[in-house]
Amino acid sequence: MNDEPKSIHEFDFTMICEYFSGLERQGPGSRDATLKALSFVDNLTPESETADLGCGTGGQTMVLAEHAPGQITGLDLFGDFIDIFNTNCLQKNLQERVKGIVGSMDSLPFEKASLDLIWSEGAIYNIGYERGLNAWREYLKPGGFLAVSEASWFTDSRPTEIDRYWNDAYPEIDTIPTKVRQMQEAGYVPVASFVLPTTCWIDQFYAPQVPAQMKFLGKYRGNETAEELVKAQRHEADLYRRYHDFYGYVFYIGKRL
Ligand code: SAH
């Protein structure tokens, strides 16, 4: 590290990553939801190649590795997450089959038509659902599977407050039939879709953030950026508690034609 002062942007990113790096998952999800999605994937063998894109510290990757055969590569933009990921692999004695690498989901370091399965929980939004589905398809073998979780509306209309919030945060949020159609249009057979239960958000994602917030605020006492970050996370959690009938994460599983 050099001593150059960081731009606000870099500082924010580092801080966001620090905030999330102590958590097992960096997005809504659960072991059960990961395994349910995996149950629709039926092509894996010990020779299979899987990529988990935007893997974070690898909460879901380790679940996959314990239940799916073959090699698994976790890819994330943030090196500190990958360091934790690779430490987790060693602790679970999975290092022969699972490795984390730093890279971007918009320029994948894999051979074309080399992957049997592309996994991505709560992360495809970083490049956009449609763009991701289209860009990733050519890395799959024909007959290979894709499983992604993605923010989705459950109804055609919804209260203005939550509509505004999401359209500002992620304008590509859309209804389940639209997401399924987009998957088909991108060259996949939509094999299954299911809504993640509220526990994936409330118990698995927001509850562990409460002690993490206390620790974080203790460390950055008086730091406006840190306080804003925690405030924003608390607001997001509050909106979810009030409006979870209208939106959530949906797992979409497709098979490459
Ligand atoms: N899949 C994990 C993490 C989800 S959070 C889980 O469910 O717990 C989204 C992740 O995407 C973060 O780890 C973030 O660092 C990563 N990310 C953001 N932009 C990315 C990009 N362009 N390429 C790869 N990873 C990216």
Image (cartoon, rainbow, N blue to C red):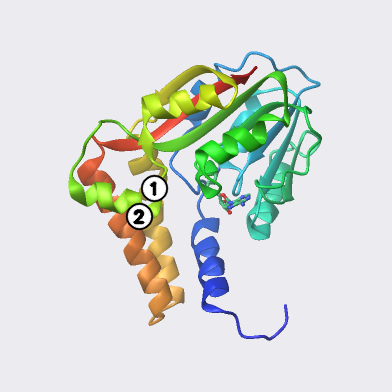
**For the point 38% across and 53% down, which residue is it?**
169
**For the point 53% across and 24% down, which residue is it?**
185
User: Which part of the image, by quadrant, shows the N terminus?
Assistant: bottom right
230 vs 203: above or below: below
User: Which part of the image, by quadrant, shows the C terminus?
Assistant: top right
Tell me residue 216's x, y (percent): 44, 68
Query: Toward which corner of the image does residue 79 lie, by quadrant?
Result: bottom right
**For the point 45% across and 24% down, which residue is it?**
180
Q: What residue sits right under mark 2 in the picture? A: 168
**For the point 53% across and 44% down, which residue is it?**
123
Residue type marked 1: Pro
Q: Secondary structure at mark 1?
A: loop
Marks 2,1: beta carbons within 8 A: yes
Tell me residue 163's x, y (percent): 26, 47
Tell me residue 214's x, y (percent): 38, 66
Residue type marked 2: Asp
Q: Secondary structure at mark 2?
A: helix
- Within 10 angstroms of label 1, few (less than 14), some, or many (20 or more) residues? few
